[in-house]
Image (cartoon, rainbow, N blue to C red):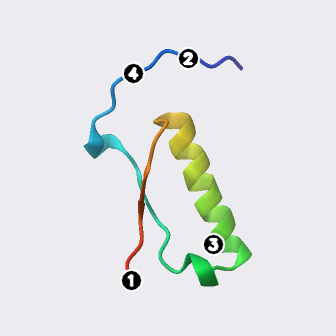
Amino acid sequence: MTHSLLARSVALRELPIIDITGLENADMRRLRELALQVKAACQDKGFFILQAMA
């Protein structure tokens, strides 16, 4: 698999929002889910937004 190093413009509204609320008490299943979301966001868009509700 080859990856392009060319930059492309991405609108803010296109960035995935990853909710990390409760991360400090998360079980392994939730941590894996979050890791997969981060991986997908990095591979697809290159950036993501973290959100945590207090």
Mark 1–mark 2 Cα distance, whole angstroms, equals 37 Å
Question: Is mark 3 in CB contact (under 8 Å) with mark 4?
Answer: no
Question: Is mark 2 in CB contact (under 8 Å) with mark 3?
Answer: no
Give me the disc on residue 8.
4
Q: Quadrant of residue 4?
A: top right
At label 3, the amino acid type is Arg
Q: Earlier in the sequence, mark 1 or mark 4?
A: 4
- The residue wearing badge 2 is 5
Q: Earlier in the sequence, mark 2 or mark 3?
A: 2
Q: Earlier in the sequence, mark 1 or mark 2?
A: 2
- The residue wearing badge 3 is 30
Q: Is residue 43 left or right of residue 14?
A: right
Question: Is mark 3 in CB contact (under 8 Å) with mark 1?
Answer: no
Question: Is mark 4 in CB contact (under 8 Å) with mark 2?
Answer: no
Give me the disc on residue 33.
none
Say which quadrant the C terminus sits in. bottom left
Q: Secondary structure at mark 1?
A: loop
Q: Secondary structure at mark 3?
A: helix
Q: Nearer the viewer, mark 3 or mark 1?
A: 1
Q: Earlier in the sequence, mark 3 or mark 1?
A: 3
Q: Residues within 10 Å of mark 3 (few under 14, many from 20)?
A: some
